Amino acid sequence: MLFNICRCAVLICRAGNMPREFESLQSARIYLELITRRLGDLWHICMGLFYPPDQKPVEREANDANFNEVFMRKETAIAELRLWYSSFEPMMKRGHISETVGSLMLKMHFKVVVMTLKTALHTKFEDTPEMWDIVDLSRKILTRVQSGSTPKFALDVGIVIPLYLVGVKCSATSLRREVIELMLADPRREGLWTALWQGA
């Protein structure tokens, strides 16, 4: 019941009425999910600009309109994400919330979306500060949830996909090595994603 209520809330929320400060992690999650859901088709458009259905490269000059549209949407989304973080940050400063797994996870997924947007039109490796932040936050999360050596399973997206994205996008060998070490050190499965497979 609560799950359905939250999903309905996502549909009616708008970035324009985002509160100055979130009252709860659940509220922050709803707004972040709203922003990321609206970006679903943008990823496909970005991929299509470089790799259309026939798998042949596209000349940039022939796609200026599409590039401009994607660029504007990227900038709008990044502005919304910055607005989200300005509402999230004050809540993070509260002593009992700042270092919880839930708050760290939300901050990490915020960083993942920003990183993905910044690198969406890149055709080569280009590092961003968010990559280091994601690895650091993943390590903090693992420290708080780690217990024993039995592989864990979760239905929700956790740290496996964020670490994998950093691993395939980052050019810094040292950071990619850290990603692999984190995945192999804590074998877990999140939906269809397995840390051991992605880290191998």
Image: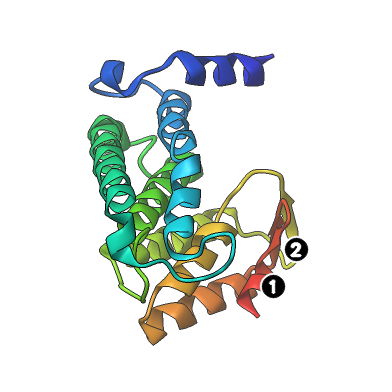
Q: Nearer the viewer, residue 137 or 123?
A: 123
- Circles 2 and 1, Cβ within 8 Å, touching? The answer is yes
Q: Is residue 178 left or right of residue 121?
A: right
**Relative image position of residue 54 (x, y in whole percent):** 59, 65
Q: Nearer the viewer, residue 60 or 99?
A: 60
Q: Is residue 53 above or below residue 158?
A: below
Q: CA distance from mark 2 to mark 1?
A: 10 Å
Circle number at residue 158: none
Residue visible at 43% across and 23% down?
A: 27
Residue visible at 47% across and 46% down?
A: 105
Can you tell which quarter of the image residue 69 is in? top left
Q: Is residue 43 left or right of residue 121?
A: right
Residue picked out by circle 1: 196
Assign a secondary structure to mark 1. Answer: helix
**Of the residues shown, which amino acid type is indicated by label 1?**
Leu
Q: Nearer the viewer, residue 62 or 146?
A: 62
First of labels 2, 1 by sequence position: 2
Q: Is residue 147 above or below residue 158?
A: below
Residue visible at 45% across and 50% down?
A: 45
Tell me if mark 2 has few (under 14), some (14-19) or many (20+) residues whose alpha carbon lies within 10 angstroms of its own: few
Residue picked out by circle 2: 151
**Relative image position of residue 180 (x, y in whole percent):** 55, 78
Q: Residue furthest bottom?
A: 173
Tell me if mark 1 has few (under 14), some (14-19) or many (20+) residues whose alpha carbon lies within 10 angstroms of its own: some
**Of the residues shown, which amino acid type is indicated by label 2?**
Pro
If the image is split into quadrants, where does the C terminus sit? bottom right
Q: Is residue 44 above or below residue 96?
A: below
If the image is split into quadrants, where does the N terminus sit? top right
